[in-house]
Image: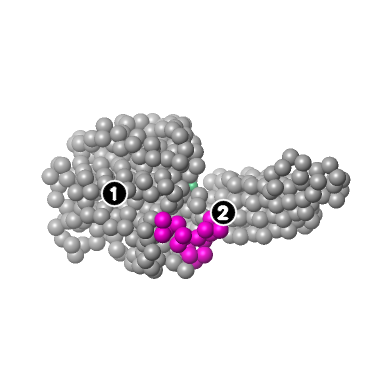
Amino acid sequence: MTRPNIDIARVEANLTALAEISEHPAPAVTRVLFSDADLQARSWMQARCEEAGLELRTDEAGNLFARWHGTDPSLPPIATGSHIDAIPNAGKYDGTVGVIGGLEAIRSLRKSGHIPRRSIELVVFTAEEPTRFGVGCLGSRLLSGVMSSSHAQTLKDDDGLGLNHWRSRAGLRGDLESVKLNPGFYSAFIELHIEQGPLLEAQRIDIGIVEKIAAPAAFRAILTGSGGHAGAVLMPGRKDALLAGAEIALAVEQAALTSGSPDIVGTTGVFEVKPGAINSIPCAAKLEIDLRDTTTPTRKLAEHHILTKSSEICKRRGIELDWETINSDEPAICDPALVERVSAAANTCGLSSMKMISRAYHDSLFMARITPVTMIFIPCHLGYSHRPDEYSSPEAIANGIAVLAETLRGLSE
Ligand code: HGY
Ligand code: MN
Ligand code: MN
């Protein structure tokens, strides 16, 4: 068994330093697209890549690329990477393990004297999280062409501010059309990430190798009632937007529970109510609904049930319903040859591994449209993620980086 030498102390120090760049106090981490914290984190990450001697470029969506040039520039590079943005009240490992770990894998290979034929490129994707505009993986959707630059420019945040407003804060004013990469631009993409589920820890497996990434869909429902005085409007005449929304949220849960698919999950993660006064009947509500499955037919059937039920609820309650599909994506099948390479790398490193599904979505879901992909998962405590007590041990992180480094070494020879 030989395994790359990983400077886990430097990795831990970097994870901690990055986690301190946040819109909320520790242990929470919040870094929303192009916020001050996100901009500061991007600069911090660029400095780490420069320290490592990589050549940097940023595209017009804010995706950051840090390249270690190989000896044969005619060969499509290998890429690795993930994201450093974070939803409100998140943890310090989601995405950052794949970025800081990817950088460390490259540094470990350079220190070992490896000379890559193919270039190796670290990618830090813009806005993997949906917080700003409601849609996730904005950077990789644009890179892969799944989202057109014209559609991206219609996106608005809660304050009605668009992508170009936020891009300009990052000094990005160029043409978004230039972001798209052609299929084959990379020879492979491998993403290191915490599992965001309990299986690896529970089964005491060191490494997860992802064969399939679940398909996400997201919907926005704007409900408009009539509001009114909480004391003066009697019950029969009410058009209460909150109660309609509450029934819809329960319908989301019911559609998932009765779908017959063991992999389907439905969540109403955003539920905002106006005017938000104790003595005023809610006149408006906004729901954002996250629905996922590993196959799209069962997910689409559940979506149909939710929309049908929502229309019936709103009609019965005299509520106006404005329903929008934010995104509705296909699952990604990972490349079997890459999966086997990671499996062999785990063996070389003397680590146990198992093949699995990713229930969370990742930039790999969209990179799979333009290049072969797989993901390397490491255990995280009790599967906790998207919460401040998200945790992955230094040993688990070092294991993941070692397998990534060994895989990148083999692919770049
Ligand atoms: O929501 C997800 O699956 C990812 O963590 N953004
Ligand atoms: Mn996440
Ligand atoms: Mn993530």
Q: Amino acid at mark 1?
A: Gln
Quarter of the image where the N terminus is located: top left
Q: Amino acid at mark 2?
A: Asp
Q: Is residue 167 left or right of residue 273?
A: left
Residue 130 pos. (x, y %): 49, 51
The CA span between labels 1 and 2 is 29 Å
Mark 2 Cα shell of 10 Å, populated few (<14), some (14-19), many (≥20): few
Asked whether 190 or 177 is in front, the reply is: 177
User: Within the magenta stretch, is there residue 302?
Assistant: no
- Residue bounds of the magenta highlight: 151-169
Examine the rendering and report whether any part of residue 64 can be seen.
yes
Asked whether 281 or 103 is in front, the reply is: 281
Query: Residue shown at 31%/45% (left/top)?
Result: 44
At mark 1, the secondary structure is helix
At mark 2, the secondary structure is loop
Residue corresponding to mark 2? 158
Q: Quadrant of residue 346?
A: top left
Residue corresponding to mark 1? 46
Examine the rendering and report whether any part of residue 297 can be seen.
no
Q: Earlier in the sequence, mark 1 or mark 2?
A: 1
Query: Residue shown at 20%/41% (left/top)?
Result: 108
